[in-house]
């Protein structure tokens, strides 16, 4: 009779074809609801659970809500700019705000030109300080930023001291003021026109009007230490008609 062959105890490979008793196959099915599962979890586990099961849905809801909120704010609260003004060297750096930096200061002009101040606004930037003869990096960056805005048509009306207007007015980014004013007004301000020669066209033209003893400037709070600030209109202004109307308004001729 053949003896039963003994299987050596060592080097025996486990039988992986048999599931262990700890396998999920043998675990009882968890029929609890999501709410019941969450009740038994600590805060950290809840965060992980929600992130795994609802992460994409939550992100989608947030994204949709953000888009909806943007359009609500845009159409309900944000106003369209009908005129954009930049004032260079208008204030001492230590000053915080002037009357001309507030929207209320322009309400009379808007109403006079058939705009509702509740629906539109004036874009105002008086933060630039730039010296024509200063070559330090900060000053040059400001000058470049101003020139970029003028090229892009971001600004419509420019206020500055005469020195800066003269140095920057020869680049072709200013409108000839003589083409913006009626002849009777032009005759009154002939001696106040600031002329420069365009470096490209080699043509002399009036790029601004000197504002000495000007009521609007006196009330604005700008150029307190400047004897004769100058106002000009950008050649690439997107709101040319409103800019011309504002020029007349500042001169007290509208």
Image: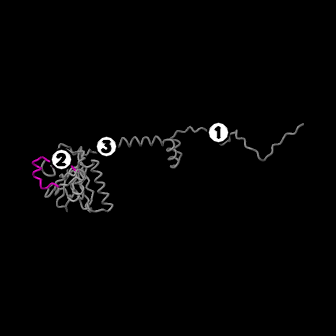
Q: Nearer the viewer, residue 239 or 66?
A: 239
Specify few, some or many for label 2: CA neighbours under 10 Å numbering under 14, 14-19, or 20 or more: some
Specify few, some or many for label 3: CA neighbours under 10 Å numbering under 14, 14-19, or 20 or more: few
Earlier residue among tags 2 and 3: 3
Compared with 209, 4 (above or below) is: above
The residues colored magenta run 174-194
Residue under numbered circle 3: 74
Mark 1 residue element: helix
Q: Give the label, 2 or 3, closer to the camera.
A: 2
Q: Residue at x 44, y 41 (%)?
A: 60
Earlier residue among tags 2 and 1: 1
Q: Give the label, 2 or 1, closer to the camera.
A: 2
Q: Nearer the viewer, residue 176 or 23?
A: 176
Earlier residue among tags 1 and 3: 1
Q: Residue furthest right?
A: 1
User: Percent x, y for residue 153?
Assistant: 27, 47
Residue under numbered circle 2: 244
Examine the structure image and report whether residue 178 is included in the region drawn in magenta.
Answer: yes
Separation of marks 1 and 3 at Cα, in angstroms? 58 Å
Residue 202: give its label: none
Mark 2 residue element: helix
User: Percent x, y for residue 210?
Assistant: 16, 56
Quadrant of image for the N terminus: top right
Q: Give the label, 1 or 3, closer to the camera.
A: 3
């Amino acid at each position: 009779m053949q003896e039963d062959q003994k299987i050596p105890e060592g080097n025996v490979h486990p039988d992986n074809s048999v599931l262990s008793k700890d396998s999920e196959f043998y675990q009882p099915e968890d029929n609890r609801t999501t709410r019941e599962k969450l009740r038994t979890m600590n805060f950290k586990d809840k965060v992980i659970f929600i992130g795994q099961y609802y992460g994409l849905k939550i992100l989608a809801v947030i994204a949709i809500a953000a888009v909806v909120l943007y359009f609500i704010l845009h159409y309900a609260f944000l106003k369209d700019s009908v005129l954009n003004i930049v004032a260079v060297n208008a204030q001492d750096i230590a000053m915080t705000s002037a009357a001309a930096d507030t929207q209320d200061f322009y309400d009379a002009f808007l109403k006079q030109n058939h705009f509702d101040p509740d629906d539109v606004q004036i874009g105002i930037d008086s933060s630039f300080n730039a010296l024509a003869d200063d070559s330090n990096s900060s000053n040059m960056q400001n000058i470049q930023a101003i020139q970029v805005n003028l090229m892009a048509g971001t600004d419509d009306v420019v206020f500055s001291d005469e020195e800066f207007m003269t140095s920057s007015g020869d680049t072709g980014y200013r409108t000839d003021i003589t083409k913006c004013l009626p002849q009777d007004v032009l005759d009154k301000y002939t001696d106040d026109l600031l002329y420069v020669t365009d470096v490209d066209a080699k043509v002399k033209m009036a790029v601004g009007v000197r504002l000495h003893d000007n009521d609007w400037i006196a009330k604005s709070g700008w150029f307190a230490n400047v004897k004769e600030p100058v106002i000009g209109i950008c050649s690439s202004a997107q709101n040319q008609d409103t800019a011309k109307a504002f020029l007349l308004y500042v001169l007290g001729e509208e």
